[in-house]
Amino acid sequence: MKYLITESQFDRAVFKYLDNQDFIQVEDKDTIYFVNSEGDKYCKIRYDMSDNFSFMNYELVDEISLFFSLNDSNSEKAIVRWVGDTLQVKYSYEKSMSITNSESLTLRLPF
């Protein structure tokens, strides 16, 4: 059986899923890192406030894709909307990128 849901209903489901991840926000200068726990060396999401650019760990994108039966592009867009909603900032799909290497320097915290 197929169900039709609105985009706002879908967003609420994905946002609740991401909220339940209990990310810790670590702020450094003009960057906000979303980490799983204190002491993590790598983040799941990185948001640069200076240019509104979001980087996300591909494992998180893949997790959302599998859980909600989405393609990667739609998962990335949902994560970007969640970041914008969580931080109350303007977001842009064009200014996002998923990183396939979870130990990428882009996702490494600078301290």
Image: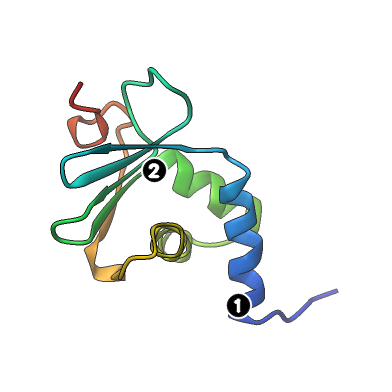
Q: Which labelled disc corresponds to residue 8? A: 1
Residue 84 falls in which quadrant of the image? bottom left
Point out residue 111 in the picture as x, y percentages from the top left corner.
20, 21
Residue 38 falls in which quadrant of the image? top left
Which element carries disc 1, helix, strand or loop? helix
Left of 18 or right of it: where is 89? left
Looking at the image, is 92 positioned above or below residue 62?
Answer: below
Q: Residue at x 38, y 17 (%)?
A: 39
Looking at the image, is 38 positioned above or below residue 22?
Answer: above
Left of 21 or right of it: where is 111? left
Q: CA distance from mark 1 to mark 2?
A: 24 Å
Point out residue 46 in the picture as x, y percentages from the top left corner.
29, 44
Q: Amino acid at mark 2?
A: Tyr
Point out residue 54 in the picture as x, y percentages from the top left corner.
28, 54
Point out residue 7 in the picture as x, y percentages from the top left corner.
59, 79
Q: Which labelled disc corresponds to residue 58? A: 2
